Amino acid sequence: MNFKKLTPEEKQVYLVNVESTLASKKLFLKCNFSLPDLAVETGLQLHTLSYLINSETNHNFKNYINFMRIEYFKEKLNDFEWKDFTVEKMTVACGFKCRATCHRAFIKHVGVPPSEYLKLYRVEYDHRIVPKMRYNFG
């Protein structure tokens, strides 16, 4: 298959398949997850998969996976069980090898480090939740 000759719509179908595979199996949470691993999971050739990610997301594989990890990080902040997690624990739970890698990726994709985002979010979270909990008699 000559991937470069596919229409934009056909490329999107492949990208949706890749994203669906990553999300449904939460493959991006694996610390050492690699492009060859994703190629095996999707059945796409390595160079085709790389081209797809680069051309359709404007990210290389590593940045694309880190973006998914950061989105997961932000999403999980809504979970009560993550309320008392440290940044380090969140970093590991999101598939990053270390806090420094998460820090760099967070600044790149969000514009602030995870600790600052967490402070901003938790203040917002506390103001939203406290009134609801005050009247929870169940």
Image (tube, rainbow, N blue to C red):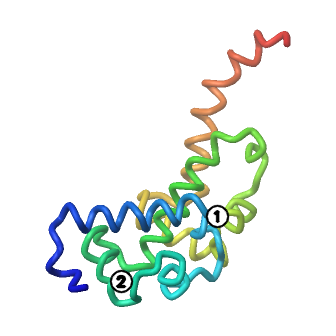
- Given residues 127 and 12, the one toward you in this image is 12
What amino acid is labelled 2 in the image?
A: Ser
Does 32 appear above or below 95? Answer: below
Real-space Cα separation, disc 1 to disc 2, in angstroms? 22 Å
- Given residues 5 and 33, the one toward you in this image is 5
Does 23 appear above or below 137? Answer: below
What amino acid is labelled 1 in the image?
A: Cys
Q: Which mark is residue 94?
A: 1
Query: For mark 2, what is the residue?
Result: 50
Q: Which residue occupies 41% across, 58% down?
A: 111
Element marked by disc 2: helix
- Left or right of 42? Residue 50 is left
- Left or right of 94? Residue 116 is left
Name the quarter where the C terminus is drawn.
top right
- Given residues 45 and 32, the one toward you in this image is 45
Give x and y (percent) for residue 4: 18, 81
Q: Which residue occupies 46% across, 64% down?
A: 67
Within 10 Å of disc 2 (Cα), the crowding (few <14, some 14-19, many 20+) is some
- Given residues 136 and 12, the one toward you in this image is 12
Q: Would you identify the image quadrant in which residue 83 lies?
A: top right
Label 1 or label 2, whichever comes before in sequence order: 2
Give x and y (percent) for residue 77: 64, 45
